[in-house]
Each structure stands twice: as C-alpha cells, then as structure tokens.
Image: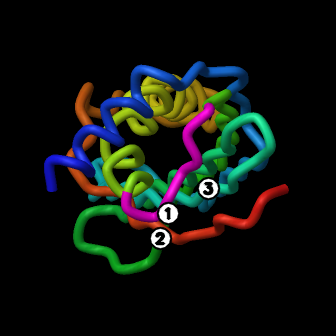
C-alpha cells in the first residue's frame, strides 16, 4: 500500500496541467419549470494515456425536479477534457484517487460557474452550487493510448 502512495505522490509531483476546456454541453428547461426544486449532480470520469501524459474526461450532469413533481424540469450536461503532461503512465488504480481529488478540484469551479451562468440565461434564479463536491465521481476506464 505504501508503494501505491509513493507512485501517486510521484504522479502528483510530476504532472503539469496542459489544457482544460469543454468538449460537449447541453441545457434543457421545461417551459413551466420553476424552483424550488430538488437538485442532484452526478459525475463520471475516464482517462486515456497519451505519448506525453494523459487526457482526463469528466462529465457533470445536473438534474432539477420541482418539489412534489417527478418529471425533470431542468438539466445541464457538461463534458470537460483536461490534458496533463506526465512521465508517469496513468493506471486504473491511480486514476481512482486522482479523479476523486485533483480532477474534481480543477474542474468543479468551472462547472459551478457554468451552472450559475446557465440558470440565469435560462430565465431561472441563479443556482450556486456548494463550494465542495459532495459526491464521489464514477470512474470508467479508457486507458488506450490516443
């Protein structure tokens, strides 16, 4: 177990953030949807090793349902691509810890801002998500080199 920690620490010391941007996004608001609403956020992560490091993909899905209703009234979906330079190859075990910590720390502020702005331009009151992510991302593995 200590060896895994050392490899992870070496990865964190070694990586360099190269790029971060939105690959896909979508928004849907039902015409008669109005808060208050129950809001939930799901996160899914995957990675691909590259010649110079790895790519991490993180998908955020927000769903809002009016109180006492079952039908979704508002959804936001965003998929980010974060590219890292690294001499250490990403593995499934390293990515589990990495996606729970570093990847979310680097992307969550962008998603919070996106949700804030998108709710406003959708004619809804501003939705400000918590500063801290309250759930663990779901990992899918995609470790082929691109």
Foreground disc of the pair 3, 2: 3
- The reply to whether dot 1 and dot 2 touch (C-beta < 8 Å) is yes
Task: Report the span colored magenta.
Answer: 87-93
Q: Is residue 29 magenta?
A: no
The residue tagged 1 is 73
Q: Is residue 123 above or below residue 142?
A: above
- Identify the residue position indicated by label 3 in the image: 47
Local secondary structure at mark 1: strand
Q: Is residue 66 left or right of residue 19?
A: left
Quote the CA–CA distance across marks 1 and 2: 4 Å
Q: Nearer the viewer, residue 112 or 35?
A: 112
Residue 124 placement (x, y as % from top left): 50, 36
| Quadrant of the image containing the N terminus | bottom left
Please name the residue that numbered disc 2 is placed on: 72
Q: Is 122 in front, or is 128? A: 128
Percent from the top left, x then y, of residue 119?
Answer: 53, 35
């Amino acid at each position: 177990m200590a060896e895994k920690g050392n490899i992870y620490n070496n990865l964190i010391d070694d990586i360099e953030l190269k790029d971060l941007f939105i690959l896909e996004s979508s928004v849907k608001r039902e015409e008669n949807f109005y808060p208050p609403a129950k809001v939930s956020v799901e996160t899914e992560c995957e990675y691909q090793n590259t010649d110079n490091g790895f790519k991490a993909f993180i998908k955020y899905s927000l769903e809002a349902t009016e109180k006492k209703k079952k039908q979704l009234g508002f959804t936001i979906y965003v998929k980010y691509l974060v590219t890292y330079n690294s001499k250490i190859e990403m593995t499934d075990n390293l990515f589990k810890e990495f996606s729970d910590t570093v990847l979310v720390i680097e992307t969550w502020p962008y998603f919070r801002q996106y949700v804030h702005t998108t709710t406003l331009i959708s004619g809804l009151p501003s939705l400000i998500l918590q500063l801290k992510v309250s759930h663990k991302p779901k990992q899918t593995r995609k470790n082929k080199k691109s």
